Image (tube, helix red, strand yellow):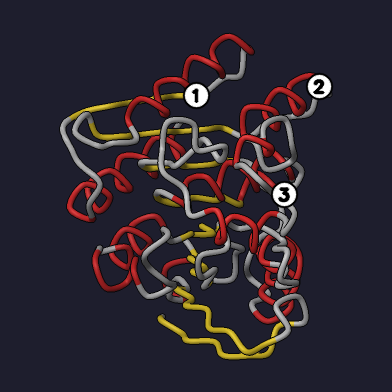
Amino acid sequence: MFLEMNFKSIELKRHTQVFVLLPDKNEKNDTSYKTLWLLHGLSDDNTGWMRYTSIERYAKKHSLAVIMPNADRSWYTDTAYDANYFSFITKELPELCFRTFSQMSQRREDNIVAGLSMGGYGAIKMAFSCPEQYGSCISLSGSLDITRKGRPCNLNEWRSIFGFNMNSPLELEGSEHDLYALTSKAKGEGKQLPKLYMWCGTEDSLIEVNRSFDQHLTELGVSHKFESSEGDHSWKWWDLHIQGALEWILNH
């Protein structure tokens, strides 16, 4: 079942759109089902996964609910311009979905957060900020270094998202937005951490930061799986590798 939800968000202070896939009743009968919170990349919106992949078929295979919110270019952050995308997706949206779709399981082990590129960053940020909510996490071609070391940055855009008084993205190092600091903090606090699967293509410009983050997690002793193989930063490869990622997460 495919649904389109349009409603006014309290956290975003405007109307927004969310796509929803639900298992057919004859697949799950009256039992609860697992949910995939699926995040888009910087140049896309909530329609991307439905337009460019066969996520509906993959969800049907595993009897998954899939929630696809629109996060614009927010980096899944409570922005400086007062649109709270992180709070919307981790708090307001789950509350709405669990209230509306009673068969969605609220158990952490039944909730997976996943995304590509900016959405890969968002998925890891959410999973390690709220490990009590998400049992598993998937990052495909994740843009994992928010400090933009060695990469160009639109400083005005970064200021509008992370703080208008920012003079350099390097100021984000060690902050709640820095995945390196966030995962170190979560590990140090002894929290139950989510299962984590990462993939990035060897022809992708983000391959080195993914390798760096893999090394960081390994040094921390954070259990995870990182794979790299042929592929660039495009939907052809995300459609392919979301399948293997789901297989690993659901069967690991």
Between discs 2 and 3, the one toward the N terminus: 3
Q: Is residue 184 toward the left or the right of residue 209 in the image?
A: right
| Front residue of this view, candidates 153 and 68 | 153
Q: Along the line of sight, which residue is nearer the eye, 221 or 146? A: 146
The amino acid type, in three-letter code, at marker 1 is Phe
Query: What residue does disc 2 label?
Result: 190
Please name which of the two marks, 2 or 1, marks the residue nearer to the observer. 1
Q: Residues within 10 Å of mark 2 (few under 14, many from 20)?
A: few
Q: Position of residue 214 (x, y in %)?
A: 47, 21
Q: Mark 1 and mark 2 in contact (Cβ < 8 Å)?
A: no
Secondary structure beneath dot 1 equals helix
Secondary element at image label 3 = loop
Work out whether 201 lies above or below 211: below
**Sequence order check, earlier mark of 1 and 3:** 3
- Residue 134, percent from left and from top: 65, 46
Q: Residues within 10 Å of mark 3 (few under 14, many from 20)?
A: many
- Total numbered circles: 3
In the image, taking residue 221 as reference, residue 202 lies left or right, namely: left
Classify residue 193 by image quadrant. top right
Q: Residue at 40% across / 50% down in the picture?
A: 116
Q: Position of residue 207 (x, y in %)?
A: 32, 29
> Going 55% across and 17% down the picture, which residue do you hit?
216
Left or right placement of residue 11 versus residue 218 in this view: right
- In the rendered image, the residue lying farthest to the top is 219
Q: Position of residue 4 (x, y in %)?
A: 47, 86
Q: CA distance from mark 2 to mark 1?
A: 20 Å
Which residue has dot 3 on it? 133
Q: Residue at x 76, y 75 (%)?
A: 11
| Measured Cα–Cα span from mark 2 to mark 3 | 16 Å
- Res. 213 mark: 1
